[in-house]
Amino acid sequence: MALVSYNGFRFLCNAFLLLNAVLHPVMAFINPRMAAMCYRQALLAAVVGYAASLWISNRSKIQFNLQFAQQVSSSADAQYFMNTLIFFLTGYVNLLLLAPLCVYAAFSVADTAKTVVKPKAPSLYERFFQQRTTWLFSKTNEAMLYVALMEVMLGLFMVAGVFTRSNSLIHLVVYWNFLSGRYRTNKATQTVFGQLKQKIDGWTYHRFCPSVVRLLWAKVAGLLSSVANR
């Protein structure tokens, strides 16, 4: 019963997140204040949903020691919870921040429909959910690569944002700490970083690329590697 209640609660959080994420760009043309509210409500739904997930998965094994804290903090739920909470509290606005949350929310909603809705309303499930959920889950690998790409792109935008003053250095440090955790625990993030490095290496080692650019990229790549692997 508790699990069903949790699934229902998480379903509502994710559905609310998706609704506000869809309304945000629409409201941007109608009422900017409502658009801002939709954005914050989407982040809040993610924070509450990830907090509930952390509580359910760890409540029976809580320990007050460093090993348990490290184990919990290395989970995807903890990484997304802390990152989303910080950006919610600081009021940072960037649609790229919502993109990964929406992808995970869509998969969670589909999974709930598959495990909870189907037993209670099989005919409804067959008509409206089965084909859509089957298609969605068949795209899991592509979706995870998309999520990782959006996260890395946001990290690069934040680097530029420090110079354009669209975000602070604190935002950059917090987010790259999050990316470091994702890199250590997520193969899709490792793949995207590897592909990005390979492309930039190709550009910077071209014979027409100035040596100063090549040297600068080598230093940046070394710095990013040390941050990701620390």
Image (tube, rainbow, N blue to C red):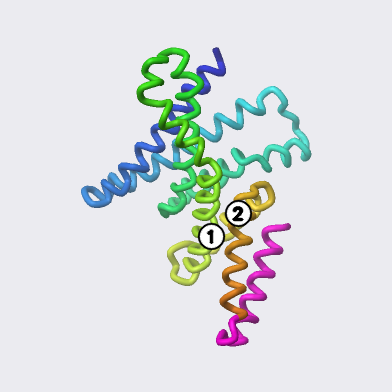
Q: In this view, does 201 lie above or below 43?
A: below
Instruction: Indicate the amino acid at tag 2.
Output: Leu
Tell me the residue at 57%/30% (across/down).
Answer: 53
Query: Which residue position holds label 2?
Result: 179
Classify mark 2: helix, strand or loop: helix
- In three-dimensional space, the C-alpha distance between marks 2 and 1, rounded to whole angstroms, equals 8 Å
Which percent across, then down, holds residue 181?
Answer: 65, 50
How would you rate the neighbour count of disc 1 (Cα within 10 Å): few for under 14, some for 14-19, many for 20 or more? many
Instruction: Indicate the amino acid at tag 1.
Output: Gly
Mark found first going from the N terminus, 2 or 1 = 1
Magenta stretch, main secondary structure class: helix
- Left or right, 54 with reference to 94: right
Please give the range of residues in magenta: 206-230
Query: Which residue position holds label 1?
Result: 155
Quadrant of the rendering where the C terminus is positioned: bottom right
Asked which quadrant contains residue 16, the reply is: top left
Please state which of residues 224 and 197 is positioned toward the viewer in this rendering.
197
Number of callouts in the render?
Answer: 2
Q: Is residue 212 magenta?
A: yes
Which percent across, then down, holds residue 52?
Answer: 55, 29
Tell me the residue at 23%/52% (across/down).
Answer: 29
Q: In this view, does 173 lie above or below 102?
A: below
Q: In this view, does 175 lie above or below 4?
A: below
Which percent across, then down, holds residue 194?
Answer: 63, 61
Tell me the residue at 58%/57% (across/down).
Answer: 192
Q: Does the magenta stretch include residue 12?
A: no
- Residue 70, disc: none
Classify mark 1: helix, strand or loop: helix
Which percent across, then down, holds residue 15?
Answer: 40, 32
Asked which quadrant contains residue 217, the reply is: bottom right
Quadrant of the rendering where the N terminus is positioned: top right
Labelled pair 2, 1 in contact (Cβ < 8 Å) = yes
